[in-house]
Amino acid sequence: MLVASVLLCGSAFSADAKEKQAAGAKVAGDWLVLLDNGKYGEAWKQLSPSQKPNAGKEKWESGVSHYRRQVGKLSGRKLLSAEYRTKLPGSDDEGDYVVVTFLSGFERLGSALETVVSQQLADGSWVISGYSIKPADVTD
């Protein structure tokens, strides 16, 4: 009986993690579409509260706009991975995070790896708590 209950709890956690993984990946993809369409103010609104004090809205919008002009228009994006985590590397904060990685193509940058970190807040809503983009070596 104990084994059955442990197995059920384990699969319930797994199902919950998979649901969170899917939700976090969707939020990340939708957020990138806002960036692709130049809706930087809307994208800023979806940043986690811990990210907003570090980047005032106008400064953040200006920086993202400048960078997106440098890399050029998006030519394509493919989801590579979405990994559910309860802790991020280098952080002691526990929570519900999904690290989502895309292989993307940009007009001037070429192939790139875009990583978006989605975070579920206590109220159940999802926000963006991290974003990075770097050139991808697609020859590996």
Image: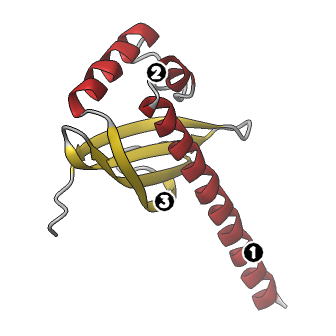
The foreground one among 84 and 65 is 65
Q: Earlier in the sequence, mark 3 or mark 1?
A: 1
Task: Specify whether 8 is left or right of 42.
Answer: right
Q: In front: mark 1 or mark 2?
A: 2
Residue that label 2 marks: 40
User: Horizontal and vertical percent for residue 53?
Assistant: 45, 15
Mark 3 is surrounded, within 10 Å at the Cα level, by few (under 14), some (14 to 19) or many (20 or more) other residues, namely many
Residue drawn at x 24%, y 39% as measured from the top left = 107
Calculate the distance from the C-alpha at mark 1 to the C-alpha at mark 2: 41 Å
Residue that label 3 marks: 82
| Disc assigned to residue 120 | none
- Where's the C terminus, which quadrant? bottom left
- Mark 2: amino acid: Tyr
Residue that label 1 marks: 9
* Residue 35, visible in the rendered structure: yes
* Residue 92, visible in the rendered structure: no
Q: In front: mark 3 or mark 1?
A: 3
Residue drawn at x 42%, y 37% as measured from the top left = 130
- Mark 1: amino acid: Cys
- Mark 3: amino acid: Ala
Task: Specify whether 74 is left or right of 14.
Answer: left
